[in-house]
Structures are given as C-alpha cells and as structure tokens.
C-alpha cells in the first residue's frame, strides 16, 4: 500500500513539474508581428526581431500567445517561432551570435547573389555564428565578402559579412532604472546615427523595425542596435535614466487649445533650455500629463522622431521644419550623463 502511495505521489510530482515547465521559443522570422488577438485583422501591438526568446503561454489554432522580454503579451503565428526544450534553449543562448546591422538583407543558400533566399533580414536580427569545426585551420563559414550564419531553427545560409558584427553584451535599462555610467557620449552618437539611418521609414503603429516604426519603436530599435535594451513604450521610457526639467509654468490651468495658441519662440526656448543632445523628449496631454509621443533630441532645437514617417523637426515655432505638436512637450530624460 505504501509503495502504491509512493508511486502515486511520484507520478503526481512529475506531472506537476511537467505542467509547470515553461514553453519557450525563439523568433525565427526577420520580424514577428504581435497582435492583440489571434486574428490577422487584429491590431498590431508590437514587433519582435529574429533571435528574441519568448515564452508561449497560450494557443488557438495556429496562433500562439507569447510573452516577449519587454515584457509584452500578444499573439503571433506558430510559423514565426521555433519552440525549444530547456536544453536546446540553453545551447542556443550560449552560442556566439551576430547582430545584423544593415536596414535590409537576405540569407541565401550559397555565397553568391544568385542564391535562393532562405529568409529576409532587418536591422537588429540575431543570427548564430557558424563556428570552426574540429581540425579546420581557418574559421568556418567565411567566403570572401560573405559569411555563413545559422538561423534559430538550425538552417544555415550566407549573408554579406559587412552587414553583421559580433553581438556584444547587452545592457538592459528598465522602467525606473538609472543609466549613469552605462552609456557614454560615443555610444549615444551611435544611437543617434542608428535613428538617422531610419529617416524616411514610414510610421507603423506597433512597428519596431525598418519595415515600419512608431515613435517609441524608433527609440527602442536605435538603442537596441547598440546593445542597449529600453522598455518598449514611451510611457515606460520616460522613467528611465535621469529626469530633466522641462519648464512649462504656462500650461497650468489651461486647455490644450489655449496652450497651443500661446506657444511662441520664447516659451519654446524656455521649455528646452535644459536639454542636451541624446536626451529623450516626451510629449502628451498638457492637462493630464499622459505621455503620447517621444523623440530623440539632436541639439539646436531639433529632434528626430517617428510621426507619419521618421523625420527631423524643430521644436521652435517659426522654423521651416517646425513640429506641429511641439507645444505638447512636457517631460525629458537623460540616459547619457
């Protein structure tokens, strides 16, 4: 009787362990579209990029509900993912990797332009390095201007060597985290350059790649391309780093229409006087303080942001490239200091 009870308890414990084991997967397409509901007509919530590790928490037909590292819970299709066991995931995470640094690219079957495309690539995608095999004198996978890479599902192919670099250790700055000493001026200039290279890319709600970006997606991908992980949304990004005062005494007790009507050059210059190049600038409802937009300050009264498309605008009224909602600036934060 005791033996039967022991076996039953053991089986119960094993079943509980299996039930509690997380289902993990890695994004295997260049961009993973995460939607509010398991339906192609449902709103796009965000994108994730190739190589991102996610948790599967639900399914409906060929749809999978996933939680991304941001964290962000939404739905995508099973074909965008490679589900892995704990052992496979550990091996994947330990493997050396490249990050794709160009806007767009391809992985081809052979190291030549005539090769068949295996997958497309966008900036920020992560690919495994095809390592040197035992007995090889030179590193495996190098062929002139090409380099051999491995996709999350184990397939290998070729892409331009100039379009990848070894993925460095990533810095994660979450909501409420300080960033002092983590980002220097050189790194911030690289972030700004990454944003500048996306100029002209169309606005896409929920977008976070060169296929389309929203305002906070532009900020996140520009930092991600430089191994810095920020929260996904502007309402979270505003609480990172050091808070910078944006002086707006003129907005108290006024409607947004009144604030807009009274916004002139002197008020604009007063609002941005404490900003430095690389600061994140936030816009929103001047009555409630809720955040609705974010850009990267470039200095000289200008910022780069995603509004209709990725563009550079002035925050100073009267300038030819004046941003029509500049009067809604309410907060700023500094990540490089």
Image: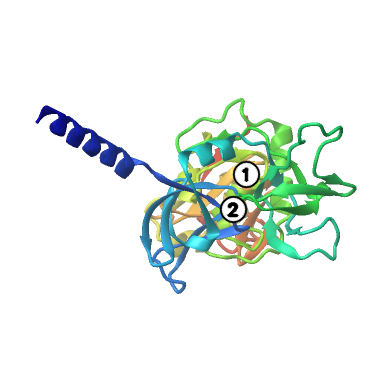
Instruction: Please tell me whether residue 183 is drawn above or below residue 146 in the rendered image.
Output: above
- What label does residue 49 carry, if any? 2
Dividing the picture into quadrants, the one containing residue 272 is top right
Percent across and percent down for residue 103 are: 73, 57
Which residue corresponds to the image point at 24% horizontal and 38% vertical from the top-left? Answer: 11
Q: Is residue 202 left or right of residue 165?
A: left
Q: Is residue 127 left or right of residue 57?
A: right
- The 10 Å Cα crowd at callout 1, few under 14, some 14 to 19, many 20 or more, is some
Kindly identify which residue carries mark 1.
224
- The 10 Å Cα crowd at callout 2, few under 14, some 14 to 19, many 20 or more, is many
Element carrying mark 2: strand
Number of numbered discs on residues: 2
Nearer to us in this view, 287 or 310? 310
Viewer-nearest of labels 1 and 2?
A: 2
Percent across and percent down for residue 88 are: 53, 41
The CA span between labels 1 and 2 is: 11 Å
Nearer to us in this view, 150 or 191? 150
Element carrying mark 1: helix
């Amino acid at each position: 009787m005791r033996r039967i009870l022991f076996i039953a308890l053991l089986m119960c414990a094993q079943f509980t362990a299996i039930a509690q084991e997380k289902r993990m997967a890695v994004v295997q397409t260049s961009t993973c579209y995460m939607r509010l509901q398991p339906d192609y007509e449902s709103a796009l919530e965000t994108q994730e990029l190739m190589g991102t590790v996610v948790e599967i928490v639900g399914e409906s037909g060929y749809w999978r509900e996933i939680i991304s590292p941001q964290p962000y819970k939404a739905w995508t299709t099973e074909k965008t993912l490679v589900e892995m066991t704990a052992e496979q995931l550990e091996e994947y995470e330990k493997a050396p990797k490249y990050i794709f640094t160009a806007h767009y690219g391809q992985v081809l079957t052979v190291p030549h332009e005539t090769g068949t495309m295996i997958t497309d690539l966008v900036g920020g995608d992560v690919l495994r390095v095809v390592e040197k095999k035992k007995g090889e004198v030179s590193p495996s996978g190098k062929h002139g201007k090409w380099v051999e890479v491995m996709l999350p599902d184990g397939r290998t192919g070729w892409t331009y060597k100039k379009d990848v670099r070894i993925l460095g250790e990533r810095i994660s700055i979450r909501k409420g985290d300080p960033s002092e000493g983590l980002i220097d001026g050189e790194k911030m200039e690289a972030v700004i350059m990454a944003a500048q290279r996306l100029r002209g890319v169309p606005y896409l709600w929920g977008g976070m790649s060169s296929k389309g970006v929203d305002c906070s997606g532009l900020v996140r991908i520009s930092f991600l391309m430089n191994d810095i992980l920020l929260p996904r949304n502007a309402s979270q990004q505003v609480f990172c780093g050091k808070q910078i005062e944006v002086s707006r005494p003129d907005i108290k007790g006024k409607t947004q229409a009144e604030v807009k009507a009274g916004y002139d050059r002197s008020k604009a210059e007063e609002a941005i006087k404490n900003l430095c190049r690389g600061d994140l600038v936030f816009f929103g409802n001047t009555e409630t303080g809720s955040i609705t937009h974010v850009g990267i300050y470039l200095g000289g009264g200008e910022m780069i942001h995603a509004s209709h498309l990725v563009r550079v605008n002035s925050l100073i009224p009267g300038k030819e490239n004046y941003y029509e909602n500049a009067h809604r600036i309410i907060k700023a934060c500094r990540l490089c200091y």
